[in-house]
Image: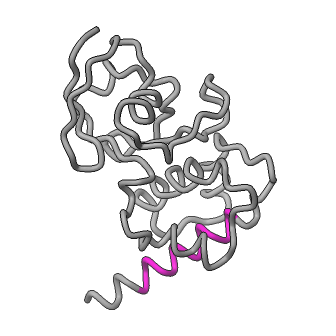
């Protein structure tokens, strides 16, 4: 066991775990952040997507030792009150069906919108290709990302 200091959702946490413990299990089992889901365990489905310094990463494949001093963001840290444009768009458009994969979908979409606030369908398809949805809500996911882009753009205009 080793002690690791992690910055998760803006808060510092110390955990005592084996260095090869997947970040997914540290988040869920040690920090109680259960929004990040276990899907396949081999990094293929995207249900466990989190951000490391703003970049999407698979929590099931990332050992805690590799997180280092990175800023870790989970779905709980995206917006604690549910007002992130993606969260608002998902609710407005009823994007989710069963919802299991949606935290990972939203986290991948958030990374996309941070890099490209006005993505095309092709940009969205490329960015979201690593996230699987068993319910096949891909068209609603794409619509949700476009809607979130509009909401964020409108909010930016209001702030000017």
| Residue depicted at 23% across the width and 49% down the height | 10
Q: Quadrant of the N terminus?
A: top left
| Residue depicted at 57% across the width and 40% down the height | 37
Determine if the magenta segment contains residue 129: no
Image check: 83 left or right of 120? left
Q: Is residue 158 above or below residue 88?
A: below
Q: In terms of secondary structure, what is the magenta stretch mainly?
A: helix
| Residue depicted at 45% across the width and 22% down the height | 22
In this view, the residue in front, 143 or 17, is 17
In this view, the residue in front, 120 or 95, is 95
- Residue 151 position within the rendered picture, expressed as x and y whole percent measured from the top left: 48, 80
| Residue depicted at 22% across the width and 35% down the height | 13
Q: Is residue 122 above or below residue 89?
A: above
- Residue 139 position within the rendered picture, expressed as x and y whole percent measured from the top left: 76, 64
Which of the 4 image quarters holds residue 160?
bottom left
- Residue 133 position within the rendered picture, expressed as x and y whole percent measured from the top left: 74, 48
Q: Is residue 35 above or below residue 78?
A: above
Stretch in magenta: 141-154
Q: How many marks?
A: 0
Determine if the magenta segment contains residue 145: yes
């Amino acid at each position: 066991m080793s002690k690791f200091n992690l910055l998760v959702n803006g808060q510092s946490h110390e955990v005592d775990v084996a260095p090869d413990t997947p970040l997914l299990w540290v988040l869920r089992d040690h920090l109680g952040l259960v929004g990040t889901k276990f899907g396949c365990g081999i990094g293929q489905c995207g249900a466990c997507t989190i951000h490391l310094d703003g970049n999407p990463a698979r929590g099931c494949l990332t050992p805690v030792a590799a997180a280092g001093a990175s800023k870790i963001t989970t779905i709980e840290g995206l917006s604690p009150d549910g007002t992130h444009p993606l969260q608002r768009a998902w609710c407005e458009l009823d994007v989710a069906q069963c919802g299991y994969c949606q935290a990972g979908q939203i986290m991948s979409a958030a990374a996309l919108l941070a890099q490209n606030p006005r993505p095309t369908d092709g940009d969205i398809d490329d960015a979201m290709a690593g996230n699987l949805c068993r319910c096949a809500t891909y068209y609603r996911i794409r619509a949700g990302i476009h809607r979130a882009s509009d909401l964020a753009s409108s909010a930016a205009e209001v702030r000017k």
